Image (spheres, grey):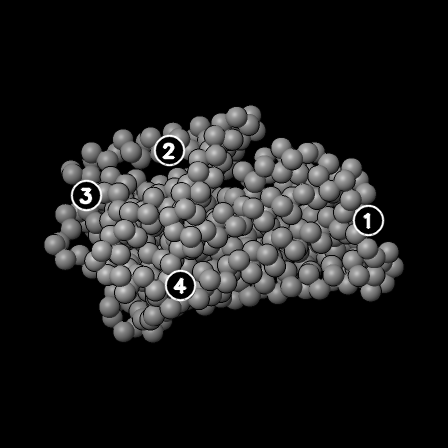
Amino acid sequence: MTMLAVGGAVGAGLFVGSGAVIGTAGPAAVISYAVAGVLVLCVLRALGEMVVARPVAGSLAEYARMALGPFAGFTIGWLYWYLYVILVGAEATAGAAILAGWIDLPEWFLAAVLLVVMTAVNLVSVRSFGEFEFWFASIKVAAILVFLVLGVLWVAGLWPHSPGGLDVLTGHGGFAPNGVKAIFTAIVAVMFAFGGTEIVTVAAAESAEPGRAVAKATGNVLYRVALFYVLSILLVVSILPWNDAKVLTSPFVSALDRLDVPAAGTVMQAVILTAVLSVLNSAIYVSSRMLYVLTRDGDAPAGLVRLNRRGVPVRAILLGTVAAWAAVIASYTSPDQVFKFLMNSIGVILAFVYLAIMCSQLRLRARLRREDPGGLTYRMWLHPYLSWLVIAALLAVLVSMALLHAQRSQLIASLVSLAVVAACYPLRARFGRKPPVAAPRTLTKAPPCSADS
């Protein structure tokens, strides 16, 4: 569970996407990552409070249903499923682009292979998913730790031919060359780079001790954010000038090249591929579990609720994979129109989900204090003031996106996806499964599933 949280926090966005953030804010991108990391940490803490008190499968949608009603549960659940289905297609396409540089085969074929392999991993059992994710996360963590060690040696002047010091950090227009506004502009983009940390709470229901596992995994997110994101970005802008063209396109590879690390480009490409496969693996898992929960609660057709003997929702996994194929096909047949819209349409969904989490935490905290005060063993900090502050910050992010021309298209497309899902709610009564009075709140109680977790 701990490594799952690590894997969710560290994706290809750190290795590649951080270049655009550095280009926007300069060395002050460190502040953008720190502020966004603290914001997401607070959201995860609020979610962790609910998971520890009431661990259920598909926690994101389930808590929205408990606190805000069936419409909120339906909307958040389907939005979250849609987010990860599109992400499956996007990551398969990204992984194929990397493999195409090494293997002389069509990219569409390589994308298909990645989809088939990762789908097979998830079909075997939750244990196979967990083991693959553990090793994927381990490779990413090892790569970052090596980079941190080498970067610190360079800054300290202990690396061969290193000038040492932090002159590069402030020597090209200052620490914040583009002003304070650029720092906050970068926060809007950075916040969604942390998407995936919440996956650990979705998987909690399939662990042997969900409350303890989630508390441990989410409690250490602050240190992971500080170590993996903030410190690594700080070292990048301390090794190379922030406005170096190479930093903007591939910051980590460029920094390692500056240190004359042999085969730095190839090694980092392999690490980025690992990060892509990690997200692909997790996205298939999360989308299938969320679809299972939607079916269980009457928000999706009944046939998708069935599990195999290993407690795996096979039909939910396959439906998500088939839907992801549409995104893959669009990425090759209409990359500048359909695929671009699909990617934009998931750009702000996490903000909607985060808002639902915070509102649910406020409502459920009051209910839990009345019904079971002893169940609140893992609590949101400074409740309720910090919860309201996070909600205000998230709304400020959305308003900022509306005012920023570069971000406005994502906000509009995501609002369209929200409107479409909300408009489908009346179909629930006709096509949704009618859940039993005592619907199971976890995927399975069978011993194999608990052991596999």
The answer to the question of whether label 1 and label 3 lie on touching residues, with beta carbons closer than 8 A, is: no
Label at residue 390: none
Quadrant housing the C terminus: bottom left
Residue in the picture at 44% in, 38% down: 392
Q: Along the line of sight, which residue is nearer the eye, 325 or 402?
A: 402
Q: Nearer the viewer, mark 1 or mark 3?
A: 1
Q: Can residue 373 be seen in this view?
A: yes
Marks 2 and 3, how far apart at CA: 20 Å
C-alpha distance separating marks 3 and 4: 31 Å
Decide which of 21, 291 is in the foreground and name it.
21
- Count residues near mark 2 (Cα–Cα under 10 Å), then give few for <14, some for 14-19, many for 20+: many
Per the model, the C-alpha gap separating discs 2 and 1 is 46 Å
Residue that carries the numbered disc 1 in the rendered image: 167
**Does the CB distance between marks 1 and 4 fall below 8 Å?**
no
Kindly identify the residue that appears in the image at 32 percent across and 47 percent down.
362
State the count of labels.
4
Q: Which mark is residue 214?
A: 4
Marks 1 and 3, Cα distance to the nearest angstrom? 62 Å
Whether label 2 touches label 3, CB < 8 Å: no
Q: Which amino acid does label 3 sit on?
A: Gly
The residue where tag 3 is placed is 432
Amino acid at the residue labelled 2: Ser
- The residue to which callout 2 is attached is 417
Q: Secondary structure beneath disc 1?
A: helix
